[in-house]
């Protein structure tokens, strides 16, 4: 048996040959300090379209990220070919921390959480006033997801030429949610698009709504140069529409009147696929109260793990003492109750 002394040459050290001909594995990973920053615009079958320094770049997720997935709106770090040329591919090596997250599950019994959009400031809930009929319970669920994820809600009511908005607005009046009422004719021949755009300036806004409500038609009016397929059929029997948007896509928002973005008016619009259900399995009901700053102080006297809809809830006394409007408490409890119910209408 050959023994080595204290002073051996490199040639004396026996190295086991690598049969595969590749480098030995190591736990040390590169830091990628020179990685460029970008934003994910859309995701399609493992390929991510990103915006880096004004260039659109195709990228894939680096293996070192494991199962961590990037979604539309994510801020990421990229390395590799960042030229944006044809047949080039970069790698996403880091996904930065998220300021907000819009999440949903397929239904209330599904434990698998889906991140729809990251880093959005606002959630525009698009609802038709007729054809198809409004679904308040779905609106409630979207509101709960917005409050839980740190997004400010905006109601956009379409097809006002078919029905009036008064009844629906009365239902949500106590929540003080900003809203815009539009019709199809106003979107292309009037000022409806500009009125919606005034709520979007300087923000990243995700648009959600069930199929057939005119969500993509609205996005096309806001970002005409990025026109998407928008004609969806509404089933005459079920009153439900057909999906015309199949993947989320972030689009740059032009200025008022379609001009170049003006200071304080530019932003991002994220069009998302139409939903037929909005599961809330992942929602912690205790976080919804944070969206009601006038009611939140009244919870200090609540019993531990209070559902805010039981005999010992301190919010009843808080409202009776005049600290908040009773309609606000009713709205809170209606939103919390939707977490326990199926989205059937």
Image (cartoon, rainbow, N blue to C red):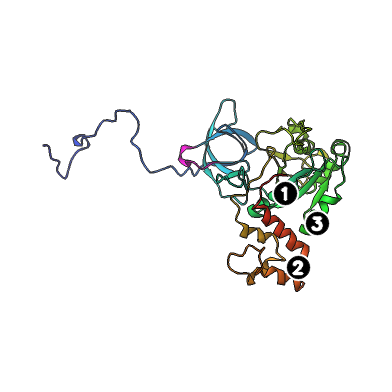
Of all residues, the one furthest to the bottom in this rendering is 321
Single out the mark in the foreground, 1 or 3. 1
Q: Position of residue 198 (x, y in %)?
A: 80, 48
Residue 222 located left or right of residue 302: right
- The residue beneath circle 1 is 137
Residue, disc 3: 173
Quarter of the image where one finds residue 127? top right
Label 1, secondary structure: give it: helix
The stretch in magenta equals 62-69
The structure residue drawn at horizontal position 37% and vertical position 43%, both measured from the top left corner, is 27
Please tell me which residue lies in front, 244 or 163.
163
Which is nearer the N-term, disc 1 or disc 2? 1
State the image coordinates of residue 313 (x, y, percent, origin top left).
66, 68
In the rendered view, does 252 fall on the left or right side of 286?
right
Foreground: disc 1 or disc 2: 1
The answer to which of marks 2 and 3 sits earlier in the sequence is: 3
Q: Which residue is mark 2?
A: 324
Q: Is residue 339 left or right of residue 193?
A: left
Q: Residues within 10 Å of mark 3 (few under 14, many from 20)?
A: few
- Type of secondary structure dominating the magenta stretch: loop
């Amino acid at each position: 048996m050959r023994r080595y002394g204290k002073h051996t040459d490199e040639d004396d050290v026996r190295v086991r040959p690598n049969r595969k001909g590749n480098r030995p594995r190591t736990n040390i990973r590169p830091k990628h300090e020179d990685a460029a920053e970008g934003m994910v615009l859309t995701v399609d079958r493992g390929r991510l379209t990103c915006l880096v320094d004004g260039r659109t770049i195709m990228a894939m997720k680096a293996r070192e990220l494991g199962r961590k997935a990037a979604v539309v709106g994510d801020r990421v770090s990229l390395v590799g070919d960042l030229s944006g040329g044809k047949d080039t591919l970069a790698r996403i090596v880091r996904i930065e921390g998220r300021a907000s997250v819009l999440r949903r599950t397929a239904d209330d019994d599904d434990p698998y959480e889906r991140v729809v959009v990251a880093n959005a400031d606002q959630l525009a809930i698009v609802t038709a006033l007729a054809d198809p009929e409004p679904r308040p319970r779905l609106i409630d669920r979207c509101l709960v997801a917005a409050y839980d994820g740190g997004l400010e809600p905006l109601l956009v009511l379409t097809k006002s030429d078919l029905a009036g908005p008064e009844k629906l607005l009365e239902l949500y009046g106590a929540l003080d949610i900003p809203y815009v009422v539009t019709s199809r004719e106003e979107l292309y021949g009037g000022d409806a698009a500009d009125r919606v755009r005034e709520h979007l300036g300087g923000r990243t806004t995700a648009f959600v709504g069930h199929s057939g409500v005119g969500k993509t038609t609205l996005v096309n009016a806001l970002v005409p140069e990025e026109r998407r397929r928008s004609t969806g059929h509404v089933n005459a029997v079920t009153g439900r529409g057909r999906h015309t948007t199949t993947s989320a896509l972030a689009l740059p928002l032009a200025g008022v009147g379609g001009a170049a973005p003006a200071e304080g008016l530019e932003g991002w619009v994220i069009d998302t696929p139409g939903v037929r259900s909005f599961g809330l399995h992942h929602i912690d009901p205790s976080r919804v109260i944070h969206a009601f700053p006038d009611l939140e102080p009244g919870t200090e006297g609540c019993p531990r793990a209070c559902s805010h809809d039981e005999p010992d809830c301190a919010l009843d006394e808080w409202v009776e003492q005049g600290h908040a409007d009773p309609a606000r408490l009713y709205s809170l409890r209606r939103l919390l109750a939707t977490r326990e119910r199926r989205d059937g209408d």
